[in-house]
Structures are given as structure tokens and as C-alpha cells.
Image (tube, rainbow, N blue to C red):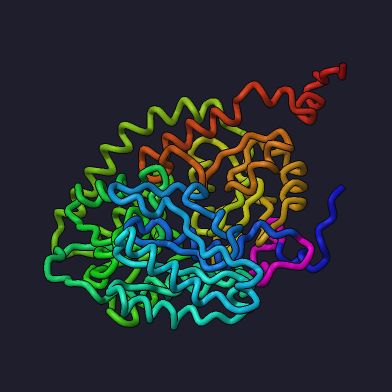
Amino acid sequence: MIDILKSRQAQVIRNGADTQDAEIACGKVSVAGSVSQRACVFCGSRVVLYPISDALHLVHGPIGCAAYTWDIRGALSSGPQLHRNSFSTDLQEMDVIYGGEKKLEGALTELIAHYHPKAAFVYSTCIVGLIGDDVSAICKRVQEKTGIPVLPVHSEGFKGTKKDGYRAACEAVYQLIGTGDTSSIAPHSVNILGEFNLAGETWILRDYYKRMGIDVVACITGDSRIDDIRRAHGAKLNLVQCSGSMTHLAKMMERDYGIPFKRVSYFGIEDMASALYDAAKFFPDDPSILSRAQELVRKEISALYPQLQKYRAKLAGKKAAIYVGGAFKAFSLVRALRLVGMTTAVVGSQTGDSDDYHRLQEICDPDTIIVDDSNPLELAKFCLEKDVDLFIGGVKERPIAFKLGIGFCDHNHERKEPLAGFVGMLNFAREVYASVASPVWQFAPRRAQAEANVIEPF
């Protein structure tokens, strides 16, 4: 039996008629002792910015922080590969005592001279916040000396949660926006915010918009280039895919450049089609864009839907648990699972707000457990209670699933197949089926016991 910490109980609700108006507690710092699945501020800023592939990314801090590299979220690039390198100032004990500013300036100067990046991002870590290095002043001095943007990312890990890291990343990248030439941008143009090109998903989305007649000025930050980000203020619309990481940037661009934004999702048939239609309807001066969007959706679904039915026949009635970073992704996953015949028994996020959780209550089935900022023991408790067949999460949730003998689908960091777009929905169904239907789970103790098929120990 696993008890939920008393100070955590307000962050868990069971969906039902008597809880429709219930307010789930969210937006709080993690409870001490709960071993939250959230990451730190530095982590949040790093995952957002490092897909910018022609920039230098330097971690100012101990070498351990630099272990958070490209491998954690394998964002692909169609050109430069500089983002796949991890650089650190490797602060030691004497640097902590006497300060690391000199070491930072030397490292920046040397790396810029060697790699000739278009820009450089410098990430402050916990120790830098404690010893008080003036990272902004060093960046300004090196920028004047080298002639490229050198941008401080104020991401000291102890300052908050991963969500605060997203904000720090938005503040840093915003310094580039508005500094490029927009004269060649097409009248029907968008930016995609919060898409990181895992397994080449950005390329799929760019192709969809191209087929509709819409120009993608910049994808921030999947497979992005500094020059594209500089001219992003010339786009007519921002499409925000990862709302947790990029809504702040979208709001700043709306405030300063008058660019409206729409929240979209590229996961699942319904949300993918809706995202394309939303973009098309934003340009009513050219009805052909909507016509092409409708033809694109019709063609893609006609090819996809018959293939989904064979997976639906096998997966009908199975149950899943979902725990992801941003709640907007959870909405799409609930709908995508329903499309293949599965129900969502547990769903939660690290960074959702009250509106997100109200929406989850609306779209989830009765008795679904909805949780904010969970921890491994809670997640294990809920998965066992609901006897789920599948856990959808990220790299930190995989061990929980496998220890419990539950199939796992990585919808976050390390995947090698695209799950966005129409083709992504087919890949998702295929992966879910392969995970849930694997014969290995018959040997998991809880499954074996349930089927009265216990394997005797040697």
C-alpha cells in the first residue's frame, strides 16, 4: 500500500460528476520529499534552446551539468551539427572560491574562434548563482569582441522548476528576434513554436504547410538557424505546439510585433487536422489554402485509417497511463488512444495550469485519475490500482513501467520514429500495439498471478 503525501493530496483528483467543478492544485513548487519527476530550471532552458543547430551552447558550471546533452532529446538537423557538442567551463573548487568569470571569457573566446558559430548561448547553473558571476557582463564583452550575439541564459537550477527554465530560454532567444531582414517573407507565413524536430517531425510539418501554400519562416527551435530566428517577427501567425515551453515567447511577440498566436497540437488525427485548418482559416484572402488543406487531410486520412483499424481490433479495451511534461500533449494522447480503442485510466503533467486540468476533466472518462507534478511512488500506485496495460511518458518514467511489468511508449525524449503528423499517428498505433501485445508481459509477476500461471522459482 502506498499513501499519498498529505501536502500532495490536493494535486490529485478522480474524475467524475462530483469533481467536475473541483479545482486541482497546480503551479506549485514541488513538495519536499516527493522526488518530483520535474527537472530543474537549467534542464528546461537547455531542452528548448539546444536544437538551434548553428549556435554554440556553453554550460557555465561544473562538468556534471554538461551531461545534459543532445542525446537526452535527439533533435535532428538538416545542416549544422554544432548543437550535438556539449561544452562546459568545468568549474572547480578554486573557481568557486575566486569566481569563474575569467574562465568563462576564455572559454567563449576560444570556442567562438574555433567553431565560428552564428551565436552563442551561455547557461548559468546553480553554482554560478551562488558565487555571483556576472554572466551578462562577460557575454556583452565577448559579443563586442567577436561580433556575434552572445546570449546569457539565466537558468540557475535552484530558482524554480523546469517551467521557469522555459521562460529563461524564451527571454534569451527573444533577444535575436527582430534583428533580421523580413523583406523576402511571403504574405502567408507562420512560425512554429515549441516543436523540436524529434525524429524529423519538423520536416513532416513543414511539408504539410508547403503543400497548403504557407511559408514556415522559423521553427523555434527544431532544426532552426539563427538567421531564421532573427526574421521570425516577419511571420503573420505563431503556431504554438508545446504550450508550456513557448507561450511566453508567443505573448512577447504578440505584444511587441502584433503577431497573434494559436495553440495547436500535431499529435493524433483530430488535432493534426485541426492545426492545419486553423492555419488555413487565418488567411481568408486566399481560399485555395483551405481547399488544399482539406485535400491534404482527406488524402492522408484515407491512407491511414484502414491501417489503424487492425490495431484498434487488437487494442480495444486496454488501459493506459499518461504522464508528460505539458498538459496540451496529454489532450492529444487521450484522443489518440481513444482512436485505437484504448481508455486513459491515469493522466498527469509536470507543468499544467488550472485551465489545462479542467479540460482534461472534460475529455477524460469517469474515474480517471488526474494528477499534477507526480512522483514515482504515486505513479506506481495509480498504475497498479488501475491495472494499466501501457504507460506513456518520458525517459524518467520508463523504469517505473518496466519495474511494474507494464508496456511503455516514449512520447518525449529518446524516440527514433516520428509521432507527429498523420504518419506519426500510424507509428504511434504500431508502437502501442507492439508494447502492449508483447508476449514478455506474461512473465511479469502481477500478470502471471492474475492468469493463474505463476512461474515457480528455481
The picture places residue 260, in percent across and down from the top left corner, at 31, 73
Residue 33 visible from this viewpoint: yes
Quadrant showing the C terminus: top right
Tell me the residue at 44%/83% (across/down).
Answer: 137
| Magenta part, dominant SS | loop
| Count of all numbered marks drawn on residues in the image | 0
231 above or below 256?
Answer: above
Q: Is residue 202 left or right of residue 415?
A: left
Residue placed at 54% from the left, 53% from the top? 330
- Where residue 140 appears, as percent x and y from the top left, is 38, 81
Q: Quick one: 318 or 92, which is closer to the camera?
A: 92
Please provide the residue range marked out in magenta: 12-34
Does 283 appear above or below 434?
A: below
Residue at 40% across, 42% down:
199
Residue at image point 27% right, 74% down: 147
Q: Does the magenta-highlighted stretch encompass residue 186?
A: no
- Camera-side residue of 333 and 215: 215
Does the magenta-highlighted stretch encompass residue 29? yes
Residue 95 located left or right of residue 221: right
